[in-house]
Image (cartoon, rainbow, N blue to C red):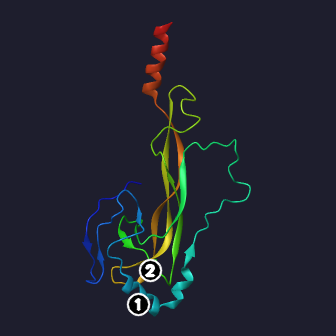
Amino acid sequence: MTSPTYETTQSDNPQLYKPAPICKDKTYCENTLYYPTDIVSRELRKNPHLRDYATVDDVDSLPGYENELEDKPLCLSTEQLVFPKLGITKNLEWKYIVNHEDLVQAVRIETCLEESQPCKVIDGFAEGYYTKCKQKFIYRQLLSLTDNSTITNDYFAFPVNCCCHVEFKVDKFLHSFNSHKRLK
């Protein structure tokens, strides 16, 4: 998933502005200059049942899946809990995410530390095969503000893990193969 272009837009509601995100190269922002706290507070007072949707992901590992000393990750990554206030939807629109003192939505993310770099341990394991670390994303359903300042569910993209991808490059393999033939 690539990051979309960043533009300032004004919604149909003059109270709800959508400023250009200050978190370029991400699919979410934890901080934004113009978060509509008053609108979120008003909507939560009108709809107190929405507080039941508050969620905080667990960042602890599952028992039995901890990394042992001899385990080596193929791609380095970091995990953290984020509290997004602005995010990219499935429709590639920036929308305000409800994150308020009365309704917290915390999302566990995992991001690559060396995206597009060769994978550890196995890079060069076979002639013509190349590895690289890639960021994977998942859609999470969160409460957000609509253009008419009501609260609804929408799907937002978040980085979920860092995977090692293997690619066979025929042209490099043939070049390498021909180089080996010439040496004989």
What is the number of the mark on residue 152? 2
- Residue 77 spot, x, y in % from top left: 54, 50
Residue farthest right in this picture = 64
What is the number of the mark on residue 58? none
Q: Name the N-terminal-most of marks 1 and 2.
A: 1
User: Which amino acid does the dot numbered 1 rest on?
Assistant: Arg
User: Which amino acid does the dot numbered 2 rest on?
Assistant: Thr
Q: Nearer the viewer, residue 104 or 13?
A: 104
136 is higher (above) or lower (below) than 84? above
Residue at x-position 70% and y-position 44% = 69
Residue at x-position 48% and y-position 51% = 135
Would you identify the image quadrant in which residue 34 lies?
bottom left
- Residue 115 spot, x, y in % from top left: 46, 46
Would you identify the image quadrant in which residue 13 lies?
bottom left
Mark 1 lies on residue = 42
The quadrant of the image that shows the N terminus is bottom left
Residue at x-position 53% and y-position 25% = 127
**Mark 1 or 2, closer to the camera:** 1
Label 1: element kind:
helix
2 is higher (above) or lower (below) than 117? below
73 is higher (above) or lower (below) than 176? below
Label 2: element kind:
strand
